[in-house]
Amino acid sequence: MDIKDLYEQITELMDKEVELKGWIRNHRKQKELGFIDFYDGTYFKSCQLVYTNALNSFDEIQKLHIGSAIKVIGIVRKSPKEGQEFEIEVKDITLEGECPEDYPIQPKRHTREFLREVAHLRPRTNLFQAVFRVRSVASYAIHKYFQDRGYVYVQTPLLTGNDGEGAGEMFEVTTMDLKNIPKTKDGEVDYSKDFFNKKVGLTVTGQLEAEAFAMAYKKVYTFGPTFRAEVSNTKVHASEFWMIEPEIAFCDIDELMDIEEDMLKYIVKYVLENCKEEMTFLDKFVEKGLIDKLTKLINSKFVRVTHEEVIKLLKEAKVEFEFTPEYGEDIAKEHEKYITEYFDGPVFIKDWPKDIKAFYMKLNEDGKTVRGVDLEVPGAGELMGGSEREADYKKLKQRMDELGMKEEGLEWYLDLRKYGGCTHSGFGMGFERLLIYLTGVENIRDVIPFPRTPGNCEF
Amino acid sequence: MDIKDLYEQITELMDKEVELKGWIRNHRKQKELGFIDFYDGTYFKSCQLVYTNALNSFDEIQKLHIGSAIKVIGIVRKSPKEGQEFEIEVKDITLEGECPEDYPIQPKRHTREFLREVAHLRPRTNLFQAVFRVRSVASYAIHKYFQDRGYVYVQTPLLTGNDGEGAGEMFEVTTMDLKNIPKTKDGEVDYSKDFFNKKVGLTVTGQLEAEAFAMAYKKVYTFGPTFRAEVSNTKVHASEFWMIEPEIAFCDIDELMDIEEDMLKYIVKYVLENCKEEMTFLDKFVEKGLIDKLTKLINSKFVRVTHEEVIKLLKEAKVEFEFTPEYGEDIAKEHEKYITEYFDGPVFIKDWPKDIKAFYMKLNEDGKTVRGVDLEVPGAGELMGGSEREADYKKLKQRMDELGMKEEGLEWYLDLRKYGGCTHSGFGMGFERLLIYLTGVENIRDVIPFPRTPGNCEF
């Protein structure tokens, strides 16, 4: 039986015998009795095992170390302890797997830096039990949201010959012997000798391929890994992370914002409802006010402003910014923060200057701005970035020319505008950014099971 | 409105005006009227638009090409055509995106080889509309199965410093300049200069990392991309594919088989129930008897035999095999086929000779076989491979030594046996193998949105 079943069926199970398998989180020993804090990972709360010296195996049980795997047979009893629904009166405990005293996870506060070094053991701690359960439940909420609404989940490829068009630095993938790279006569790398007979890297986005599927299914989404080879050691950057990229045909930028807002509220609500214990823990020990923050988001109406309006507000602000806000330029973190505080809630900023946005965004009538939209969320910064896509073949081609982009390798992408193209929009959400927001955990390394960052690829 | 809504709410919508957006799949023109086969990808069935020369725009509409994106306003009418529930009496059609006559997707039979060359357009065909919808729904069925049962979804890393221990050839990942690879004094590649300061590749399995999480959550699963750098150009091999790898603590090999059987039946049932139109199409045009085959699987009881019993059966068989079955050796495709036909259903083959199986499988008491289990399914071959894992630190270490495996980089994996190890089991299922089985489509290139195989990395 799982501890989850125990909590869910406690009324029926009271005074019944149960068999449980799990691990010892803590062990307090007294002369005539002992208490084991016992968990099996199926439920956030652990359960207390009580044993007395009436048991023949009392001495054996007293020797059990923290971290050991055990099988327990016992009777469910009402607990005399306040706030504790029940406890297990032990009839027998069998040791399944020993745990020596040098076990790194002891019942005390470990630093998160230390726990990253034992990433294979850290999910056993309360903090990471909560974080990675939330990660799992949030993943499911995302799938459920889109599937319930008829979207098709597209697993876009990770190996790609496209260079991602400036979305970020790429890792190169090869099977050539690095010691003896084949070269052409001109001394260039001879990619015709490589596995794919061409230069291939790890994708930075699945958007372009998702667009092809949106032109067939109307509503699609991706949810998969993405890579960045940038050497940036910040709290919010990882070399490997997961992205959600919905793409919708016959959808303009205003309808896109409706979807973004609806989806985000749905996920937050789903996590609050399905991770009650975990969220209570995170609210108490990681970010005070976390649940209030999330509840406020669900009940808020996201504001929609243009980039120009934002710059105007920033210029009028009675704040000494480190970076001066300028029309036609990107905004800094401090500006994002000011804007979400000014509106006291999430803000969509749209109609960005074309020169600071990607080539595929639809040009506005003014010829200067594009229908891109970023969602700024208080305490999370930029959580999503999306746009209406340029659906006009000529305009898209012209923009690619302006930027000196080669058509080669992107003919198929242009085809989408040639053969029955239509108004369409999509956005990308970094899954770990969302998790940082949902859990209150600040460092991206602590919301990824085995994080990869420059110089770090352990486990 | 989506066409899906139209089909689902047809009674209420009859004789009402609707607005639809989608594409022209076919267009039959007569002198005084015309018929447009119209789809929007939200439902497998298309819907028929009927327009007459009573419309001012009659001439304009007649010029519309196949593949064009259009907006339609019309009245839902009972169709005079047998077997067709309704049709749309057109009031107005607006062209949203033109499609020239060189459009590669014409209303005729295209070869699958040709369609692979236009992988960005092929989801618009009936066949691929069906296949990729099934792919999406099957993905969701997998998540739903595990989430409903309390499993934690773990996104294991794709970038790894482990070499996968013989599971397959790996792609190497680097940010070094291939033209000028840094070398050490000894002429070796100087990986200290690479992004992760070490040699890193694309993972061939998430199992080892999943085991770490099973030791914390009891029940976990992975569902993500996996890579193989083998140069094999078969119908069932791709360089990039998706795998599902559940891992369960306190679970032995018999309980594992229960889970495998239950999960497979669940997915098949879910797809049959939620992709009715698609499965009917695939049954009719791709694999005759497909639905019967799948229904039979749901109602069958999977047989469980040992590898030794299988060899005995094969030796006794009155069949001229190309390869002679031998005790202690692997079995060939022809043998798998014979066995599933012999039992007339899915067969679990367990207790494999240790020398042909992976290092982490639990050694049986005989010292010769391991608790590995393969599931053979009629018409699909080996669909899943799993095992009870070696939970004993010393035995695992000894096996690694026997195989000449280095402990370096796998200390953390050994730790899982040192600190509260327990009986645990898991299996892997290649998602595309499942899809080939579910759809009847034979080639793995036709169940992956943008397939990657040796020499092929387009789009």
Image (cartoon, coloured by chain):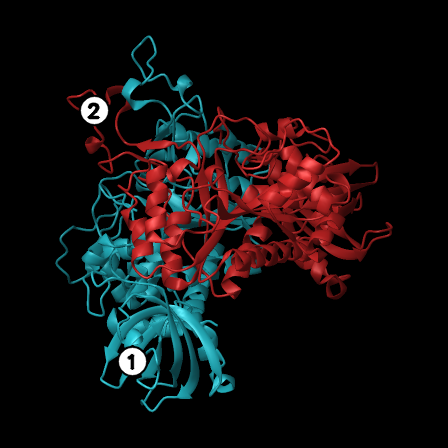
Chain colours: A cyan, B red
Instruction: Return the residue nearer the eye: A429 or B363.
Output: B363
Residue neighbourhood size for the residue with mark 2, other residues' Cα within 10 Å, grouped as few (<14), some (14–19), many (≥20): some
Up-down relation of residue B193 to residue B52 (above or below): above
Callout 1 amino acid? Phe
- The chain letter under disc 1 is A
Residue B265 is tagged as none
Quadrant of the frame with the N terminus of chain B: bottom right
Residue neighbourhood size for the residue with mark 1, other residues' Cα within 10 Å, grouped as few (<14), some (14–19), many (≥20): many
Extreme bottom residue here?
A80
Residue A35 is tagged as 1
Q: CA distance from mark 2 to mark 1?
A: 58 Å
Up-down relation of residue A289 to residue A206 (above or below): below
Q: Which mark's residue is nearer the viewer, 2 or 1?
A: 1
Callout 2 amino acid? Pro
Extreme top residue here?
A185
Residue B182 is tagged as 2
Q: Is residue A100 visible?
A: yes
Q: Element under label 1?
A: strand
Q: Position of residue B402 (x, y in %)?
A: 35, 38
Q: Position of residue B422 (x, y in %)?
A: 39, 60
Contact check, label 2 and label 1, Cβ < 8 Å: no
Residue at 43%, 84% in the rendered image: A76
